[in-house]
Image (cartoon, grey):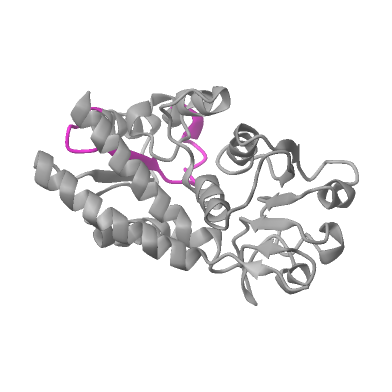
Amino acid sequence: MTAHLLDGRALAKTIRETLKHDFAAFQSRTGATPTLAVLRIGEDEASVGYARALQKTCDGVGAGFRAVELPLSAQQAEVEEALAELNTSPLVHGIMILEPTPDHISHPALIDLLNPAKDVDGVHAINAGRLAADRPPYFVPATPAGGIRLLEQADVAFKGKEAVIVGRSDIVGKPMALLLLHRHCTVTLAHSRTVDLPGVCRRADILCLAVGRPEMVKADWVKPGAIVVDFGTTYTDAGLKGDCDQAGVAEVAGMLTPVPGGTGPVTNAILMENLLRAAERAVSA
C-alpha cells in the first residue's frame, strides 16, 4: 500500500486564485483594502522570515500589509500602546502578534488585549471559546482549518471516525480536536505524556500530528489505511521534516499530507480568507 498524498500546494493555489477575485470585488464595492497588520518585537530570524512570507501572501491576493516592528528593548507598555492603535484603526482589519516575544514581554497579556474582531489567527479567548462551543462567528486558527480543508477536498467522511491528535497546543492541537469533534468524530487529544502513545495512535482512523518532534511517529504507530495529517515543520540538517517518518508511514497509511507540500502551503491561504471575513464584518458592523 502507498498512501494517497494530499496536495496542499494545489489547494492553496486554488484558494488564492478565488481570493484574488474576492479581494478585488471587496475593494471595488467598498473602496477599502483588507489589511493585515503584523506586530513583531525584536529580530528573531524565524519571525522575520514569517513576516516576509505573510507580506508575499498578502501581495499575491491583493490584500494590504502593515509591518509594526518594535525593538527587542521595547517594554510591555510600549507594545500594548502599539497594539491598541492597531485595535482601533479603521485601516487595519486583521492583526497577528508574532512569536517568540522577548522574555520580558507577556504574550498572554497581549493576546488578551487583542481585538477579537481582528484576531484572524483565532488565538483570543473569545474566538477559542466560541469555537469550543461551536457558536459562530469565530476565527479558526489557519493551520488546523487548512488541515480540515485538505480532508474535505479529499472527500473524507468524518462521522463516526476515531480521531487521535498528538499535540495540545492552543493554535493547532486543541482547535483541530474541536473541528473534528464538531464533524462527529470520536476524538482523543494525546500528547508526549500519554501512556502507550503508539498504541493510542494505532486506534486512529484519522491521526493528526502536531507535536513538533521530527519523524517521531513511525509506521508501526499507524493503523493500516489510516488518514495521517502531519502538521510538523521542523528544519533539520536533512531539510524540512514532519512529525512522522514520511517514507515509512506512506507504506501503511491510506492518505498522508506530505512535508513539505501538505498542510503548510494551505495555512497562509486560509489566513487570507479570515482576513477577508474580518474586513467584511467590519464593513457590515
Residue at 35% over, 56% down: 54
Give yes or no for residue 119 being in the magenta stretch.
no
Looking at the rendering, in which quadrant would you find the C terminus? top left
Q: Position of residue 210 (x, y in %)?
A: 65, 50
Which residue is nearer to you in this view: 150 or 120?
150
Q: Which residues are magenta?
A: 88-109
Looking at the rendering, in which quadrant would you find the N terminus? bottom right
Q: Quadrant of residue 75?
A: top left
Q: Position of residue 86 (x, y in %)?
A: 26, 34
Seen from this angle, which residue lies furthest bottom? 238
Residue at 37% over, 57% down: 15
Side of 62 relative to 192 (left or right): left
Does residue 216 appear in the picture of this structure?
yes
Side of 283 relative to 242 (left or right): left
Check the image and report above or below for 218 versus 83.
below
Which residue is nearer to you in this view: 146 or 182?
182
Secondary structure mainly formed by the magenta segment: loop
Side of 85 relative to 175 (left or right): left
Which residue is nearer to you in this view: 240 or 162?
162
Q: Quadrant of residue 115?
A: top left
Q: Position of residue 81 (x, y in %)?
A: 29, 29
Q: Position of residue 107 (x, y in %)?
A: 48, 34
Does residue 41 appear in the picture of this structure?
no
Check the image and report above or below for 61 versus 241.
above
